[in-house]
Image: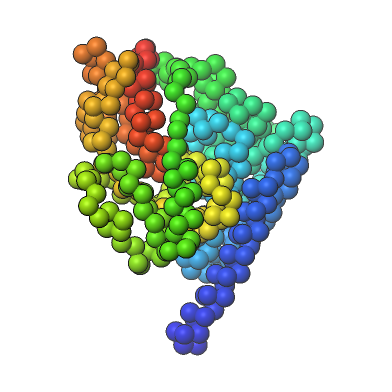
Amino acid sequence: MNGQDDFEINQLLESDLRAIRQRLFTKVVNSNRSQAVLDVQRLLADEIMRCESIRKHDKRLIFKKHLNRLRYYGDCISWKFLHAHTIRQLSKQNTPVPSIINQKESFEHVFRIAEKAVSMLKVPVIISDITNCLKIGDIIIAAHPEKPIIVECKRSKNTRYDAIGRRGRQLQRMNKVVEYLRNGKVYDGEKEILTIEGTVPPKYNWITINELLHEAEKSGQSTRIVSKYEVLYVVSNWKRFDPSYGLEHAELDLNNPIVTIHTEAINNTISLVPPLSIWEVDDKFKFRLTEGELLVVHIFNPRGLIGIGNNYGSITGVDIEIPNTKELGYEVTKNDEKILLSSTFMTHISYGYQTIESVADAMIETGALPRSR
C-alpha cells in the first residue's frame, strides 16, 4: 500500500468519524428532557468505548481527536445543566481522563445507578467519565445548577478502607466541594474560602462573532476591530489566514498581545470556557466550529485594561508577579490599596469572548470585595 492509498483511507475514515460526531452533537444540543440526556450519554459512552478499543492497536491522531470531541460533547451537557462556577469546582482535581473500556464493569455499574436516579428524580444526570471537565464524583445529579448532588459509586460493600488511600482522598475532596457549593464556604486547612456572588452580569461579543461567521462563510475570512486593543477574525482556511486583513489604516495598540484560536480551548480542555453548544451564534455554525472548519482568532493586548475604573476602583497593572506563586496577575487599586487578582480573568476575554469592559468591571468588583480570612 503506497502513501496515496494511506491518504485516501484516512480521508474516508475521517469522513466516517465526522459523520458520527455530527449526529451525536446534534443529539446533545437537542436533548433537554432527563431521559433523553441520559440516552445521548449512553450513545457517547458506547462510541468512546469503541474508539478506546481501536486506540489500543491504532494510535493515529484522528482517533485521539475523535475521543476528545466525544468527551467535549459531555462537557456541553455539563454546561447545559450546571452553573459555570459549579463546573469550575468539579474540574479542579488534576487527573487524566479515565479510560472507560479498561473499567467497563465499574462504568456499567455507574450507568445503572444513573438510570435509577433519572427514573426516581426526573432530573438530568451527568456521568463524569464521559466528560473532560468533571473530575470529582462519578455521577452529578443536576437537581440545582449551583448545588448538584454528587455521587461516588463503588461496587464493593466493604467500607473498611473507604477513609484511607486513594478512595479516602477522593471522598475528602468530594465532601469539601459539596460543603463549599452548599454553604458558600469551606476551610481548606490554611484559610477559609468564601463564595461571594458578583453583581456585574457578563457581556459577550456573540453578536460580532456571529456577523463574522456569516461574512467568512462567503469570503473565507472576516475581521472586526473591537477596540484599539482587540481584534477578532473568523477564517475558514488557516493556511490562508492574513492577520493584516481588514486592518488598513487602523490605529491599534497590539504590542505583546495574547493570540488565541478557539479550538485551543477544546483541545486543551479549558474548563472555564463555555462550550460551543451554548455560544449565542447561529446553530448552523456550531458543529463546524467544533471541527475547526471555521476558526475564531482573537488578538488582545491586556494592557488595554489599565485605566478602566468605576466607583469601586480601577485596574492599575498587568503581568504583576503574585507572591509565592509562579503566576502573573492583575492589579486593582481601591482607595490606595493594591490588590492582585488571578490571570484567569484573561481566559474569559481570550477564549470566553466576554467584552473587555465586562471583565474589567468584574475584576474591579472582585478587588473591592472583602478579603477571605
Q: How many marks?
A: 0
Q: Position of residue 52 (x, y in %)?
A: 58, 60
> Closest to the observer: 28 or 373?
28
Residue 49 visible in rendering = no
Residue at image point 55% right, 20% down: 179
Q: Position of residue 3 (x, y in %)?
A: 44, 84
Apparent side of residue 231 relative to residue 182 in the rendered image (left or right): left
Q: Going by the picture, which residue comes out furthest to the right?
A: 119
Please tell me whether residue 257 is drawn above or below residue 340 in the rendered image: below
Q: Position of residue 25 (x, y in %)?
A: 62, 53
Apparent side of residue 198 relative to residue 322 in the rendered image (left or right): right
> Closest to the observer: 38 or 241?
241
Residue at image point 65% right, 53% down: 26
Please tell me whether residue 29 is drawn above or below residue 6 in the rendered image: above
Apparent side of residue 317 relative to residue 366 in the rendered image (left or right): left
> Closest to the observer: 291 or 254?
254
Residue at image point 55% right, 52% down: 286
Residue at image point 76% right, 42% down: 35
Q: Position of residue 121 (x, y in %)?
A: 76, 30
Display coloring: rainbow
Residue 244 visible in rendering = yes
